[in-house]
Image (cartoon, grey):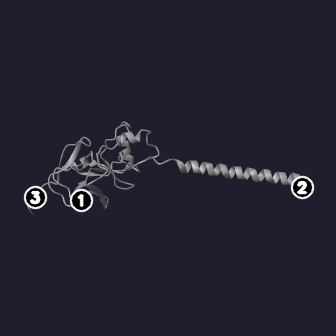
Amino acid sequence: MTAAAKAPYFKVRRSKVHGLGAFATRRIRKGARIAEYVGERVSHAEADRRYETKSDDDNHTFLFIVDRGIVIDGGVGGNDSRFINHGCDPNCESVIEDRRVFVEALRTIQPGEELKYDYSIGRDDDDPENVDEIYACRCGASNCRGTMLWPAKRPKKRAKKKAAAKKKAVAKKKAAKKKSAKKKAAKKK
């Protein structure tokens, strides 16, 4: 194996995007497995417990959801892959295999280029009103969607409104039928 093949793919340093970032130390070919995202593997309940005292306005996290049962806390026993920042035009992607998370190159990455993947942080019904400000994206890509969240726009609560409107319409129809039946009964008398 050559010395270049043994050299690390990236190093961590200050980033214009956010805090620290991971920067390619050499050319990384498309499809290369760059790193495994590691850290303590915990349940969702434990991850929530660990960060429950954290301010709602703090978006800084090293949690990576693997599946419905496991979360990796890269802040505990993690490696430098936890410093790969979000980007709307990513050059990397996260891949989950056998409940392990890997970061792979989506395209050839040049030395000095910052590694980024799309965090696609899911929205929750109980998100604070300012969640879009908290998870604002500053990646600088020409196609930046302005947020690390997915979907990019807060879904409208149309389903509840539609259901309520439908229920109201059904109730109105029933009331009209009742009234009509009463009128018919009154005419027969």
Q: Pointer 3: what residue? A: 4
Label 2 environment density (alpha carbons within 10 Å; few <14, some 14–19, many ≥20):
few
Question: Which numbered disc flags the more N-terminal residue, 1 or 2?
Answer: 1
Q: Pointer 2: what residue? A: 188
Q: Secondary structure at mark 1?
A: loop
Identify the residue at horizontal 58%, vertical 50% (top origin): 162
Image coordinates for residue 22, horizontal then vertical, percent:
21, 48
Is the residue under label 3 in contact with that under label 2 (CB below 8 Å)?
Answer: no
Label 1 to label 3, Cα distance in Å?
19 Å
Q: Nearer the viewer, residue 49 or 157?
A: 157
Identify the residue at horizontal 59%, vertical 51% (top origin): 163
Label 1 environment density (alpha carbons within 10 Å; few <14, some 14–19, many ≥20):
some
Q: Amino acid at mark 1?
A: Arg
Q: Which mark is residue 107?
A: 1
Foreground: disc 1 or disc 2? 1
Q: Which mark is residue 2?
A: none
Identify the residue at horizontal 44%, vertical 39% (top origin): 129
Foreground: disc 1 or disc 3? 1
Question: Which numbered disc flags the more N-terminal residue, 2 or 3?
Answer: 3
Q: Residue furthest left?
A: 3
Image coordinates for residue 84, horizontal then vertical, percent:
25, 49
Q: Residue furthest right?
A: 189
- The quarter holding residue 56 reads top left
Label 1 to label 2, Cα distance in Å?
81 Å
